[in-house]
Image (spheres, helix red, strand yellow):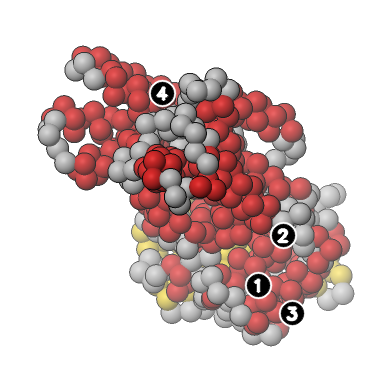
Amino acid sequence: MIQIDGVSHRIGGAPILHDISTRLPQGKLTALIGPNGAGKSTLLRLVGRLEPLQAGRITVAGHDVATTPTDRLARVMAILGQQTAIASRLRLSELVAFGRWPHHKGRPGSVDRAKVTEALDAFALTPLAGRFLDEVSGGQAQRAHIAMAVAQDTDWLLLDEPLNNLDMAHARALMRRLRAMVDGGRSVGMVVHEINYAAAWADHVIAMKNGRVVAQGPAGSVLTEDLLSDLYDTPIQIGEHRGRPLVLHHC
Amino acid sequence: MRPLPVLGAALLALMLVSVSVGAAQVDLRTILSDHRAMLVVLESRLPRTVAVVLTGAALSVAGVLIQALVRNRFVGPDTSGTAEGAALGLLAVTILWPASPLWLRMIAASAAAMATTALFLAVVRRLPVREVMLVPIAGLVLSGVLGSVVTFVGWQSDLMQYVGTWLMSGEFSGVISGRYELLWFAGIAAALAWFSADRFAILGLGDGVATGLGLSTAAVMRLGLAVVSIVTAMVVTTVGMIPFVGLVVPNLVARIMGDNLRTSLPVVALAGAVLVLACDLAGRLVIRPYEVPAGLILGILGAVLFLWLLHRRPAHG
């Protein structure tokens, strides 16, 4: 479980998060949803210790994020922030292989190599394995970064808008893969913009707005017409498709 | 074509030529029976060759490291305020304690180089990430400002000749046995960096990825800073700053091999040694028996190579 207690955060004096207390349940796929500027990414980055914690306390599977050594945390959770332009010229296979670095610290064994091969395969990157990161498309680079985080093979996987740049087929393949990981006992937390991915795949939803958690709970109880219309300040209807909610926001 | 054996063979060949070329006639075949030739080789030719190789290799590795630290390919140890910092440290210790022992001068040069390079890193951190060209410009501005401080202090204290040999000449004609050994420190520092090659490669992927993989980014930055500063300080004090090597060689090698530093750093080191040795040899041969500084040849060749690299760069890199 990821436990978040009394977390507040400011960036350049502007308050981003106000006294957030929530949790991401163990063994579930949790989606963080909310309008732009709600603080979802900031909260995820704080959990993943990509930003220093200013106030409050966060524990990941019992490890206090502020005090646990960073390399110890890297074996408990993998985090992928939003990718900015990276000029690094690594082959995709080399990038994914770095996902195993927290485990072998430079001396990869057969287990490490197997996990890298598996991750490359899972994200349809095997044919691109020898290509350089600066010579593939944005979506392919994104998939390689996700494959690296998956190869890290941690109990917790945190992804900040992993669906960015991915086409429908690869987005669905990613969600299916995450679902399988969760069903196999892992836990996933992700920031999602396209609400229907949360509706179709998430177990648990945390809805945020203006730096506060406005609703949380099982997907079915959070994804309601009233709540989403309020959350995004726009009229939203909800239908049903194969027993899951389907959010209709184009009408 | 595997780069490592090819470059290794090229370096050996160039080293042989370097040992046989010079003002005095030396025949390598009769060297064992000829005392005078042996003296020339051991006291002058061999030290010079080793000094060039160490300088080229260490500066190239330092270039890779500073480029990983600032995540920008258009900087080198000669455009990040490092060399000027080393000169500033040397000036300070020369003025404050003229009789200071060599080891103290080395420490002063390295520490000052570290301080100015850290200043460069701090400046770069505040620049918008997407403005790729601001980083080298900031480096050039910082180098220029520090360089003018060095020149001013050198002028005021009548030490301009020293300043010239540190920052301008970049030549190896003064190298004899006993006057280049500090370069071994540069070579050792660069070699030690190889053991952290993975860490530098991961750091090059950005703070977010590096932290996610459990890397202490601050510790890796400090290590890189130390290596770049020591290498540059040693080169500046013994032969003077050599331009372009630390900028061009990492770029050339990355184009071919990518940034997996564990495999590419040895190639970078060899390629740097080959390039500087070739330039030093060219400098010794163009107006025999007189010499042109290797730094001058590199300045011309490096500028051409760099323009070619800029031009050839893929648009989305």
Q: Which residue reaches farthest front?
A: B33
Q: Which residue is mark 3?
A: A180
Dot 1, how many residues are within 10 Å of its Cα: few (below 14), some (14-19), or many (20+)? many
- Please name the amino acid that badge 3 sits on: Ala
Dot 4, how many residues are within 10 Å of its Cα: few (below 14), some (14-19), or many (20+)? some
Q: Nearer the viewer, mark 1 or mark 2?
A: 2
Distance between mark 1 and mark 2 Cα atoms = 13 Å
Q: Which residue is mark 4?
A: B168
Distance between mark 2 and mark 3 Cα atoms = 24 Å
Q: Which residue corresponds to the image point at 65% horizontal and 68% vertical from the top-left?
A: A97
The first of marks 2 and 3 along the sequence is: 2
Q: Which residue reaches farthest bottom?
A: A184
Q: Which residue is mark 2?
A: A92
Residue A151 shows which numbered tag? 1
Element type where label 3 sits in the image: helix
Residue B85 shows which numbered tag? none
Picture coordinates of residue B282 (x, y %)? 58, 29
Instruction: Provide the chain ID for the residue under circle 4.
Output: B
